[in-house]
Image: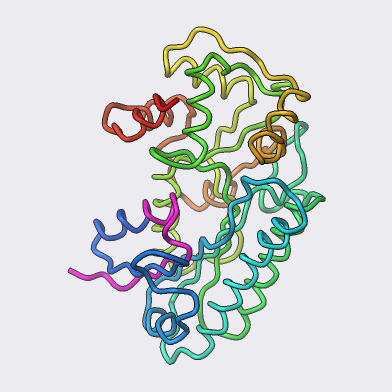
Amino acid sequence: MNKGKIVIAGGSGFIGLYCAQRFREAGYEVLIIARSGPHIRWEDKAGILAALEGAVLLLNLAGKSVNCRYNEANKQEILNSRLDTTSTLGNAIRTCSRPPQLWINSSTATIYRYAEDRPMTEAEGEIGQGFSVDVARAWEHVFFAFERLVPTRFVALRIAIVLGPGGGVIGPYTNLVSMGLGGQQGSGRQMFSWIHIEDLYRIILFLLEDESKRGIYNCSAPNPVKNRELMYTLRKVMGQSWGLPAPKWLLELGARLIKTETELVLKSRWVIPQRLSEEGFVFKYQQLESALDNILDKNYPSLKLLIKRP
């Protein structure tokens, strides 16, 4: 039984492909908009319009990865890849005769300030400063600017670090542990807000099925941990008794060598899903250890191969 049509923009990545599979298993027709592959292309305006027509959900995950050096060219591409695709979708929806019932747009928990003192909620979170925050603010501004123009329900997800098999940060982290480099990073006090990819999918389904849900939601497990606890738990699950710690200066050097930014590791993200908890969503993976146990389980042989790869 076809429950309706779901369009995933930027759907060829780690999160998009997982959600596409789960939605198909749940009985939905899924169409993907992407820059490559056997999907609807961003330059195909007619194809995008046809896909959006009558959809029950548009899920927008599009945007260049932030796992790169923040030089001017990359910064511009990170920003434009989010604003341009969101504008393309919004303008297409405006011409639909039957616009999508719900538009969920990705945002990021990085929008909040560096926080070791208290958690950030939707109601009391303090917006931070810096390039990543500026991108998040601009992204949400462009998204919500369309809300008054179309009869579609709007939700922005401020997503924490997504943990799941075969993609995202799990590969790099498990490689560090397997090489004996799984100690705390920097001070180890910085908070690590995370969410299991299955709970991310379940949150999207939860929001889809309740037409009263709209606005901004923190998309993070209810029990964030300090970096030192993250690394300890990962070592425990992987059966490694010890890991060499990485001071800030070494992380800065390593980030330059592998062309990324230390912000991805050193920023303290302390984000709590207050709205989801108050509105009745129950996380399947509330504790980091159970999430990692599941992700590193024998049921995910592709991830085991990823971990062992030199």
Please report the residue visible at 59 percent of the width from the left and 20 percent of the height from the top: 229
Please report the residue visible at 60 percent of the width from the left and 86 percent of the height from the top: 149
Count of numbered labels shown in the rendering: 0
- In the image, residue 179 sits, relative to residue 140, either above or below, namely above
Q: Is residue 185 left or right of residue 217?
A: right
Residue 244: x, y in percent?
62, 12
What colour-coding does the image apply?
rainbow
Residue 174: x, y in percent?
48, 26
Q: Going by the picture, which residue comes out furthest to the right?
A: 129
Please report the residue visible at 67 percent of the width from the left and 37 percent of the height from the top: 270
Residue 53: x, y in percent?
39, 84
Q: Quadrant of the C terminus?
A: top left
Q: Is residue 254 left or right of residue 229?
A: right
Foreground residue, 76 or 167? Answer: 76
Is 268 in the magenta? Answer: no
Is 15 in the magenta? Answer: yes
Q: Going by the picture, which residue comes out furthest to the left?
A: 1
Q: Is residue 236 left or right of residue 70?
A: left
* Rendering quarter of residue 87: bottom right
Residue 196: x, y in percent?
45, 40
* Magenta segment: 1-18
- In the image, residue 92 sits, relative to residue 238, either above or below, namely below
